[in-house]
């Protein structure tokens, strides 16, 4: 879907509660470029016909770019955000070793760490027989344990997931890693490298800001946020641009 080609600040449609879009908010704040947010309640609004006009799959996040295009899927959105200002160092130019390493880590976080928690979210959102719930949670626990063990080994003693400075991978990581505080699947202290990075990120101003946004608390120290925009307003803009 496309709108007018006139440039406007991008709009990030983020899901609450606890959407993986959290990482995209953090990345936008790290860059400090102007943007709007559009709050999408899950599962109600995200599955509505209105939102599916923005994202046919009915998932968050979605990004309306400055050019008026709509992008979905966290990895695509994060790469688009990072490419806006490569000088900040949170992303890399396509075709470089850094770009390949970043995409490798983002893909792992998406297909392994994110996916590992899916059984736990499913049991929360659906009524299940106790035996079926146990099968799902046992399966999920095994996946979460493996993902943490593998990621701990991949990271080693590096200060951040990819090395000496934070990247988009760290922004995406914190949005998923915090799910363990909710589901209590593992004791992250058993993975000291991951615990160290988690603690660093939780103290980061952009992460503190994103938590406040999700909780609808007054955000402190916003760098790029212009304000919130309603879904209905975005749809009106789309219609008027046709």
Image: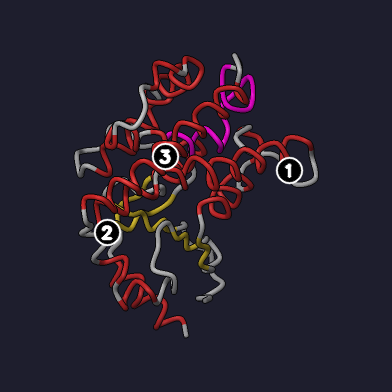
Task: Name the residue rendered at 41%, 56% in the picture.
Answer: 12
Going from N to C along the chain, the mark reached first, 1 or 3, is 1
Going from N to C along the chain, the mark reached first, 3 or 2, is 2
Residue labelled with disc 1? 93
In the image shown, does 164 or 192 lie closer to the viewer? 192
x and y percentages locating residue 206 in the rendered image: 39, 32
Residue labelled with disc 3? 176
Left or right of 178? Residue 126 is left
Q: Disc 2 and disc 1: Cα gap in Å?
A: 34 Å
Which of the numbered marks, if any, corresponds to residue 42?
A: 2
When the figure is inspected, residue 17 is found, relative to residue 239, above or below; the finding is above
Residue 23, image quadrant: top left
Going from N to C along the chain, the mark reached first, 2 or 1, is 2
x and y percentages locating residue 184 in the rendered image: 29, 31
Task: Name the residue rendered at 47%, 57% in the picture.
Answer: 10
The boundaries of the magenta stretch are 159-175
When the figure is inspected, residue 230 is found, relative to residue 194, above or below; the finding is below
x and y percentages locating residue 43 in the rendered image: 26, 62
In the image shown, does 185 or 134 lie closer to the viewer? 134
When the figure is inspected, residue 100 is found, relative to residue 162, above or below; the finding is below
When the figure is inspected, residue 75 is found, relative to residue 67, above or below; the finding is above
Which one is closest to the eye, mark 2 or mark 1? Answer: 2
Q: Which residue occupies the extreme bottom position in the image?
A: 242
């Amino acid at each position: 879907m496309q709108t007018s080609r006139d440039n406007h600040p991008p709009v990030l449609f983020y899901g609450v509660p606890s959407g993986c879009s959290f990482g995209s908010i953090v990345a936008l704040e790290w860059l400090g470029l102007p943007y709007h947010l559009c709050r999408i309640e899950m599962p109600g609004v995200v599955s509505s016909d209105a939102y599916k006009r923005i994202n046919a799959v009915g998932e968050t996040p979605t990004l309306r770019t400055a050019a008026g295009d709509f992008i979905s899927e966290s990895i695509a959105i994060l790469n688009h955000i990072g490419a806006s200002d490569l000088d900040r160092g949170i992303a890399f130019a396509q075709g470089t070793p850094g770009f390949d390493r970043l995409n490798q880590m983002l893909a792992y976080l998406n297909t392994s760490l994110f996916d590992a928690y899916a059984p736990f979210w499913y049991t929360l959102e659906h009524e299940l027989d106790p035996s079926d719930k146990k099968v799902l949670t046992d399966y999920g626990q095994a996946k979460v344990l493996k993902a943490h063990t593998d990621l701990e080994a991949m990271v080693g003693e590096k200060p951040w997931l990819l090395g000496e400075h934070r990247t988009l991978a760290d922004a995406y990581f914190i949005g998923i890693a915090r799910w363990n505080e909710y589901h209590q699947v593992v004791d992250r202290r058993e993975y000291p490298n991951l615990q160290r990075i988690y603690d660093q990120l939780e103290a980061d101003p952009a992460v503190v800001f994103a938590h406040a946004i999700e909780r609808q608390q007054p955000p402190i120290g916003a760098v790029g946020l212009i304000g919130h925009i309603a879904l209905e307003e975005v749809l009106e803009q789309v219609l008027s641009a046709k």
